Amino acid sequence: MASYIILNYSVEDQAAFAAYQKEARDYVLSGVLDFLVYEPKTEVLEGENVGHQTVVFRFESAEKARSFYQSKEYQRVLPMRLRSTSKHFAILVSDRVI
């Protein structure tokens, strides 16, 4: 069952965010099954504390998504993203057959 990590945030410090991207890029791309969405101008349909940028990654399973997010490698660079953004959230969702 595929699972997705959805990140949303507003970039506040472009230089610091660029440093995060540089540090995170190789690890992110090696651990993600598919990099599905990068939307720098997210259209907010509902809610108030939503950032302007959204990223969606697809993984083979929820376990692989959690492993990626909780890994030492990602946890090392995560503070860089958090410091350079506001209104950030990360959620994990999985395909479900209804």
Image (cartoon, rainbow, N blue to C red):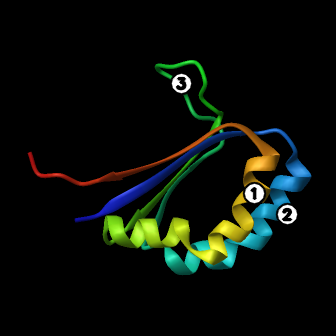
The disc labelled 2 sits on which kind of residue?
Answer: Ala
Residue 63 location, x and y as percent? 35, 70
**In the drawing, does residue 22 fall left or right of residue 35?**
right
Query: Measuring 67% from the left and 79% from the top, which residue is drawn there?
Result: 26
Q: Earlier in the sequence, mark 2 or mark 1?
A: 2
Residue 41 percent across, percent down from the top left: 64, 35
Give the alpha-carbon distance from disc 3 to disc 1, as whole Å.
Answer: 25 Å
Q: Position of residue 58 (x, y in %)?
A: 40, 63
> Residue beneath label 1, please?
79
Dot 2 lies on which element? helix
83 is higher (above) or lower (below) than 79 = above
> Which quarter of the rendering shows the C terminus?
top left
The residue positioned 69% from the left and 60% from the top of the image is 78
Residue 51 left/right relative to 82: left
Any mark on residue 44, and which?
3
Total marks shown come to: 3
17 vs 91, nearest the viewer: 91
Check whether the beta carbons of the residues at disc 3 and disc 1 lie within 8 A of each other: no
Distance Cα–Cα, label 3 vs label 2: 27 Å
